[in-house]
């Protein structure tokens, strides 16, 4: 048994910088008009000490957060040392309170100059991101757990397939080129982190946070629906995992020849971060883009979330079982529900953590669970109405108020012995 498996189970919460603090230099700031009204979102950049104190109230022993690239490098050749120092102070406060920091380098947003001049389908994007990553890894002290990219497939699907997020393209070949460059960056940043972390620290733990969904055919009797859900499951859930094993990204599109892309990520994974929220049903529709129609259905009777998503705890076990083939520790790096009803949050947490407990009892190597999110935040393309937080935010006064779900999460942390 290796060292980390004897360490405490990571009970945490997850956030992202832009969703809490905004940034005047980020591509998203000019993308969504709601940020004209609330440019600082929750004002977390100024109120971070207050928010970090909430972690002590919860009793978590880990906190996942991101550094905002556009604050650190607001212009191509300008670095803001005060921004770097700000994130170092966050880390210092966490360590002082025996809370393990987990730092995400890239959580959807970019400096505006980057997305305009060096979008991910341009090879020059690799050098720019590596320069940023090396600076951060060299400067931030006390971090063992690193996430290189949050949900790279969501980034590509939204930014290159649907065109609903920056860079706003609808070009599948460019999207695949962008995905290759992002995964190339992961492989190189993995090496940077392992070379930069001092020998005095425990072995660094590096991963991506991969969004995985339970995918099912809309009509189980329809062979086209079954085929689409199978293809989607391979692409969306499985192809990244397989690439970490083989070094080749194999992508199958409906009614087209599979694409094989070499990516330098084989074995470059110390744990695997799983973001899990929902189940999606799929059916063939020739009038929809790529012939695919998606739908959420309340089959289990838990009701749809405020995002319109199905609550499907059993799907978490299925994705964790497949992720176990990587033979590295698994950490649920995001799991949460958008609702204003605290009791629904409580039920959601309990049912999903019951699944985690069951999976551990079956021998799955699960080392942590991070609820999304600590406080209410800006939700991509949804504004401020998707209430994921354990602490409610009044967006007029910016006051934080605990919900009953926060107290219940504290109880779960104390009562479930996963170590």
Image (cartoon, helix red, strand yellow):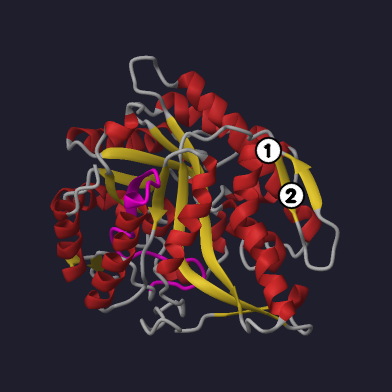
* Quadrant of the snapshot with the C terminus: top left
- Residue 205 coordinates in the image, percent (x, y): 43, 32
Name which residue lies at 49% across and 66% down.
Answer: 380
Q: Which residue is mark 2?
A: 250
Locate residue 45 relative to residue 194 in the image: left or right. left
Q: How many marks?
A: 2
- Residue 293 coordinates in the image, percent (x, y): 67, 80
Q: Quadrant of residue 238?
A: bottom right
Q: Is residue 140 above or below residue 340?
A: above
- Residue 48 coordinates in the image, percent (x, y): 26, 49
Q: Which residue in the rendered view is the most extreme toward the front?
A: 362
Main secondary structure found in the magenta portion: loop
Residue 369 visible from this viewpoint: no
Name which residue lies at 38% across and 84% down.
Answer: 303
Q: Of helix, strand and loop, which one carries label 1?
A: helix
> Foreground residue, 10 or 373?
10
> Foreground residue, 209 or 4?
4
Q: Is residue 392 on the magenta stretch?
A: no
Q: Which residues are magenta?
A: 360-384
Q: Which mark is residue 246?
A: 1
Q: Is residue 375 on the magenta stretch?
A: yes
> Foreground residue, 313 or 193?
313
Q: Of helix, strand and loop, which one carries label 2?
A: strand
Name which residue lies at 27% across and 32% down.
Answer: 6
The reply to whether callout 2 and callout 1 are in contact (CB within 8 Å) is yes
* Quadrant of the snapshot with the N terminus: top left
Q: CA distance from mark 2 to mark 1?
A: 10 Å
Q: Which residue in the rendered view is the most extreme toward the top?
A: 199
Q: Quadrant of residue 405?
A: bottom left
Residue 236 visible from this viewpoint: yes
């Amino acid at each position: 048994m290796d060292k980390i498996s004897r360490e405490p189970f990571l009970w945490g919460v997850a956030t992202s910088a832009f969703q809490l603090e905004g940034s005047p230099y980020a591509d998203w700031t000019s993308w969504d008009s709601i940020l004209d009204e609330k440019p600082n979102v929750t004002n977390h950049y100024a109120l971070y000490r207050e928010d970090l104190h909430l972690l002590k109230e919860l009793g978590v022993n880990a906190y996942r957060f991101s550094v905002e690239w556009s604050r650190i490098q607001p212009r191509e050749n300008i670095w803001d040392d005060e921004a770097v120092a700000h994130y170092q102070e966050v880390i210092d406060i966490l360590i002082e309170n025996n809370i393990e920091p987990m730092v995400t380098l890239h959580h959807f947003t970019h400096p505006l100059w980057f997305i305009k001049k060096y979008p991910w389908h341009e090879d020059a994007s690799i050098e720019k991101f590596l320069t940023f990553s090396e600076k951060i890894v060299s400067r931030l002290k006390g971090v063992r757990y690193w996430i290189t990219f949050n949900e790279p497939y969501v980034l590509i699907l939204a930014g290159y397939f649907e065109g609903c997020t920056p860079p706003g393209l609808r070009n599948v070949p460019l999207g695949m080129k962008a995905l290759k460059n992002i995964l190339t960056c992961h492989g190189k940043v993995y090496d940077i982190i392992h070379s930069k972390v001092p020998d005095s620290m425990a072995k660094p733990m590096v991963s991506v946070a991969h969004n995985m969904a339970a995918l099912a055919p809309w009509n189980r009797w329809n062979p086209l629906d079954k085929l689409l859900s199978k293809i989607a499951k391979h692409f969306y859930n499985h192809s990244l995992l397989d690439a970490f094993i083989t070094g080749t990204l194999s992508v199958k599109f409906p009614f087209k020849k599979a694409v094989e892309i070499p990516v330098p990520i084989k074995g470059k994974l110390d744990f695997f971060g799983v973001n899990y929220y929902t189940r999606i049903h799929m059916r063939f529709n020739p009038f929809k883009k790529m012939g695919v129609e998606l739908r959420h259905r309340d089959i289990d009777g838990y009701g749809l979330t405020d995002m319109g998503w199905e609550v499907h705890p059993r799907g978490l076990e299925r994705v964790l079982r497949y992720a176990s083939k990587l033979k590295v520790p698994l950490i649920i790096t995001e799991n949460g529900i958008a609702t204003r009803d605290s009791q629904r949050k409580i039920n959601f947490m309990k049912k999903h953590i019951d699944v985690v407990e069951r999976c551990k009892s079956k021998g799955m190597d699960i080392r942590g669970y991070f609820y999304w999110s600590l406080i209410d935040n800006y939700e991509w393309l949804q504004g401020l109405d998707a209430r994921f937080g354990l602490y409610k935010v009044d967006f007029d006064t910016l006051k934080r108020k605990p919900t009953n779900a926060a107290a219940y999460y504290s109880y779960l942390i104390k009562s479930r012995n996963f170590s």
